[in-house]
C-alpha cells in the first residue's frame, strides 16, 4: 500500500466517523440558562453562581418542573460539615438565600423529591 492510498483510507475513515454521530444526542445535558447542568434519574438540575446561586430544575425534555408537587431542598458541604440552605421559590427557579460568600470551596447538594422518590446531585463551587 503506497502513501497516497494510506492517506485516502485514513481520510475516509475519519469522515465516516464524524458523520456517524450527526443528528444524535451526545448524552450530555445542555445548559438552558448559562450554568452548570447535572442529570439525575428524572430531571436536569442547573446551577448558576453569580451574585446569588440560582437552581433551575427541568425534566428530560427541558421543560420547567417547578410545581407544587416538587420538593426541593439543598445543603452546602463545607469541609465535611453539612450546612442547610434556605431556598426562595421563584416562578421558574429557586434562589439560595443563605450567605455562602465567606466559604472559599464548598459542594452544593440539591435534593429533589419527585413522586415520592428522592434524587440528589452535587455541584463543586467556589467563591
Image (cartoon, grey):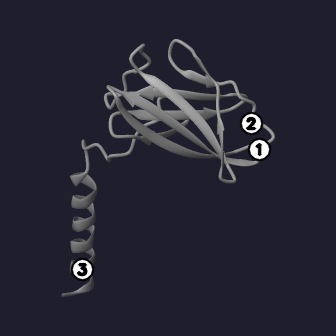
Q: Name above or below for residue 69 compared with residue 104.
A: above
Q: CA distance from mark 2 to mark 3?
A: 58 Å
According to the image, label 1 marks what residue?
103
Mark 2 or mark 3: name the one nearer the start of the chain: 3
Q: Residue at point 47% right, 29% down? A: 32
Mark 3 or mark 1: name the one nearer the start of the chain: 3
Question: In the figure, residue 44 lies in which quadrant?
Answer: top left
According to the image, label 3 marks what residue?
6
Q: Name above or below for residue 12 compared with residue 4.
A: above
Residue closer to the observer: 80 or 31: 80
According to the image, label 2 marks what residue?
100
Q: Position of residue 108 (x, y in %)?
A: 60, 41
Q: Position of residue 10 (x, y in %)?
A: 26, 72
Q: Is residue 69 left or right of residue 98?
A: left
Q: CA distance from mark 2 to mark 1?
A: 6 Å
Characterize the local packing of mark 2: few (<14), some (14-19) or many (20 or more) Cα atoms within 10 angstroms: some
Farthest right residue in view = 102
Number of the front mark, 3 or 1:
1
| Quadrant containing the C terminus in the rendered view | top right
Check if mark 2's residue and mark 1's residue have beta carbons within 8 Å: yes
| Residue 34 can be seen in this image | no
Amino acid at each position: 500500500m503506497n502513501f497516497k492510498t494510506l492517506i485516502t483510507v485514513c481520510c475516509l475513515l475519519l469522515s465516516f466517523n464524524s458523520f456517524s454521530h450527526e443528528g444524535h444526542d451526545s448524552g450530555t445535558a445542555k445548559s438552558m440558562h448559562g450554568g452548570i447542568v447535572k442529570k439525575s434519574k428524572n430531571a436536569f438540575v442547573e446551577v448558576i453562581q453569580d451574585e446569588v446561586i440560582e437552581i433551575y430544575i427541568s425534566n428530560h425534555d427541558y421543560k420547567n418542573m417547578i410545581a407544587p408537587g416538587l420538593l426541593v431542598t439543598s445543603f452546602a458541604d463545607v469541609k465535611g460539615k453539612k450546612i442547610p440552605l434556605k431556598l426562595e421559590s421563584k416562578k421558574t427557579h429557586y434562589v439560595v438565600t443563605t450567605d455562602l460568600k465567606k466559604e472559599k470551596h464548598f459542594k452544593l447538594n440539591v435534593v429533589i423529591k419527585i413522586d415520592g422518590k428522592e434524587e440528589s446531585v452535587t455541584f463543586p463551587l467556589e467563591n
